[in-house]
Amino acid sequence: MAKHRIYTTAFASIYPLYVAKAEKKGRTKAEVDHVISWLTGYDQKDLKAQLEKQTDFETFFAEAPKINPSRALIKGVICGVRVEDIEEPTMREIRYLDKLIDELAQGKMMDKILRRN
């Protein structure tokens, strides 16, 4: 079975869409970066480097410095699919990020988004 095309899509091509979605709802680029950092462990310098290298999604997650173990607390539906039911690991990571960006755009408090109940 062929890989989904999102795997080979440059993270840098989707990142501005994440930022635009958040900013449209009154959130900031810094908050988007914070969510990405929480999920992946990339600091600002490394995130910028990944964007400049046009790293694809599969590599972006494979090279992530420290995937947050609390990401398993992310539950809910994204694109009509429950994130906790996605079996393919890379797709699940991508959907975790999508879900976090959605929550940011929906106005949730950062502590809730970062699962700091």
Image (spheres, rainbow, N blue to C red):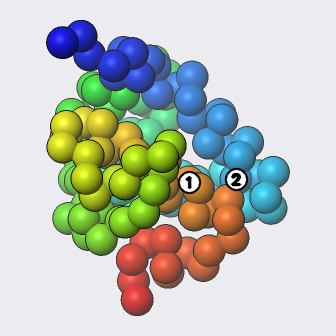
Frontmost residue, 84 versus 73: 84
Q: Residue furthest front?
A: 80
Closer to the chain start, of discs 1 and 2, is 2
**Labelled disc at residue 101:** 1
Residue 83, how many percent across, how many down?
Answer: 34, 53
Circle 2 residue: 22
Looking at the image, which residue is at 69% across and 70% down?
Answer: 107
Amino acid marked by disc 2? Ala
Disc 2: CA contacts within 10 A as few (<14), some (14-19) or many (>=20): many
Q: Quadrant of the C terminus?
A: bottom left
Furthest residue toward top: 2
Foreground residue among 4 and 24: 4
Q: Residue 92 appears in which quarter of the rendering?
A: top left
Whether residues under marks 1 and 2 lie with C-beta atoms below 8 angstroms apart, the answer is: yes
Q: Which residue is drawn at 30% across and 36% down?
A: 91
Residue 40 spot, x, y in % from top left: 32, 50
In the picture provided, is 11 more to the left or to the right than 8? right
